[in-house]
Image (cartoon, grey):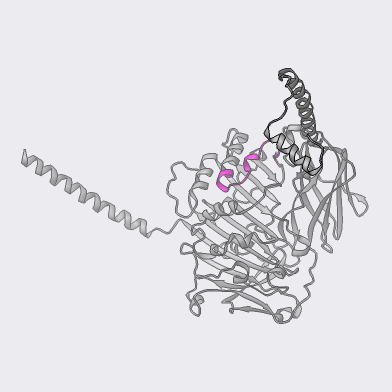
Amino acid sequence: WSLDWAGAKRMEGAKALLGLWLLVPALAGRAAEPLRDSLREELLLSPLPSGDLAATFQFRTRWDSDLQRAGVSHYRLFPKALGQLISKYSVRELHLSLTQGFWRTRSWGQPYLQAPAGAELWVWFQDSVADVDKAWKDLSNILSGIFCASLNFIDSTNTVIPTASFKPLGLANVTDHHFLRYAVLPREVVCTENLTPWKKLLPCSSKAGLAVLLKAERLFHSSYHSQAVHIRPICRDAACLSASWELRQTLTVVFDSFATGQGKKDWSLFKIFSRTLTEACPLASQSKIYVDISSKGQESELLEVSPAPQSVHEASVLGNRRTYAVYDLLDPGLFNASRSLNVQLKWKRPQDGLDLAPPVLHAQRYVSGYGLQTGEISTAIYNTHPYRAFPVLLLETVPWYLRLYIHTLTIITKGKDNKPSYIHYQPAQDRRRPHLLEMLIQLPANSVTKITIQFERALLKWTEYTPDPNHGFYVSPSVLSALVPSIIAMEEEDEELSPLFASLFPSFDGSSYFVRLYTEPLLVNLPTPDFSMPYNVICLTCTVVAVCYGSFYNLLTRTFHVEEPSRGGLAKRLANVIRKLRGVPLL
């Protein structure tokens, strides 16, 4: 028995050695394989003509994996929460933005990536999803928990299915709009509880790299704050034989440099963020800072950037030629002189302001009319290009309690009617879905196109009013999508070599670039009952009932007794003696 036991032990040892011998080449081959995921982080600092400063953070995580395949369990850089969400609900693309404030296009110029005020969510689902509405509802509820936002209030009353707008930004084999859902919550308030989970999705969180500058008390002390998450499939290589998943986290903040710099345009990283950079994210394959030093005429001589940039990059962005000073945080020589990097920009002499040419495409929206029964929504679209006309796709989403009169729709350009080449209108259903209006309108050169439509205000049930109904009800902003003609010839660049802020909306030709703009959200008053009247009625009724019933009850329950008059006690006699001595009548 002992010999058999010893032989069995020797056999087990031989099997273990054989398994280890077979495992070593596999481990060596896996170690030699290139990493399937990568991280790029980038910060763009743009002095605005108004004197403000725009800071745009972008963190791109790319993963060469098929998330739609079941069994993906190992996550290195890509957030597991979002990866499982894509896999479970068969998401093709997901775009979420949380914004506080409004981008002032006339004062700040064309934005790199604009988002509407509040919360915006639009998702493309795979064509294998059977019940898109249920998947959309479950997905919005889960995202509400991940980002601590009120996305659970997204329902059929604020969800639309655009037919022409919001085409996929990544690889798309199917463009059936029935798999698209779009919703906006213009009343959503963005605060630190939304920023914290957003930072936790970063591979280095806020411990290293550019994310160190994401200090909440500085970011929210700004004129504009917008954070977004974009997930889409992209080509893995130039041949595009396979796809990779891209997660792009963007954060745009506009600081009032006059308020923070005592009326000066000078700024630095420490003055803006109260922190400096000491290292790049160890997991990042690229970490750069871009400072926009583009200027006109002799104004370039007035700018002084310190420390001296390592290189200068020129790119065609939004139809203009821009020049950027570049700092590579992965370069060891950047931190040799000092242990921290504090980029500074100074003006050699004070400037009153830079002349800003009006953007080629911008719009504004407002409500007109009087009273609480009818009104009119007006949208003015400006094309300031001197000689080029181009079409623009307009998307209007109006709540059901504003009943549109579609026959009153007018489009006027230069005093003449402008007939849209494409129009899609889906009427609203009370308490079920909103109005949806999409139009493709041709904008002549150097023109203003005014779009008006009249509406009637509905009377809500008393349970449908918000806690502060006299504040008003928000209407989602209009969305404009267009290929804007470029002033200069734009050169196509490799997406991996170009900056991140110039690669989200790639241009297919050198003569135009894609722009998506949002107008202001509207605040509309509805007929509101006097909610204080029930309180007054309750108080008055309760008072009358208490007085009447209380008196009647008192008469019914009180027992009356006849008291015999008493001569008084010792105290009364003492009082009479004192009153007699003072000459006062006795008691």
In the picture, measured across the screen, residue 569 lies left or right of residue 326, that is: right
Q: Quadrant of the N terminus?
A: top left
Q: Nearer the viewer, residue 168 or 148?
A: 148
Magenta segment includes 152: yes
Q: Residue at x 73, y 58 (%)?
A: 103
Q: Residue at x 50, y 58 (%)?
A: 205
Quick check: 335 above or below 495? below
Quick check: 485 above or below 303? above
In the picture, measured across the screen, residue 91 lies left or right of residue 22, that is: right
Magenta region: 143-161
Q: Residue at x 56, y 53 (%)?
A: 198
How many callouts does the rendering have? 0
Residue 463 position in % (x across, y down): 73, 32
Q: Quadrant of the C terminus?
A: top right
Residue 120 position in % (x across, y down): 67, 47
Q: Which image quadrant for residue 575?
A: top right
In the picture, measured across the screen, residue 62 lies left or right of residue 224, that is: left
Q: Is residue 71 something that shows in the picture?
A: yes
Magenta segment includes 281: no
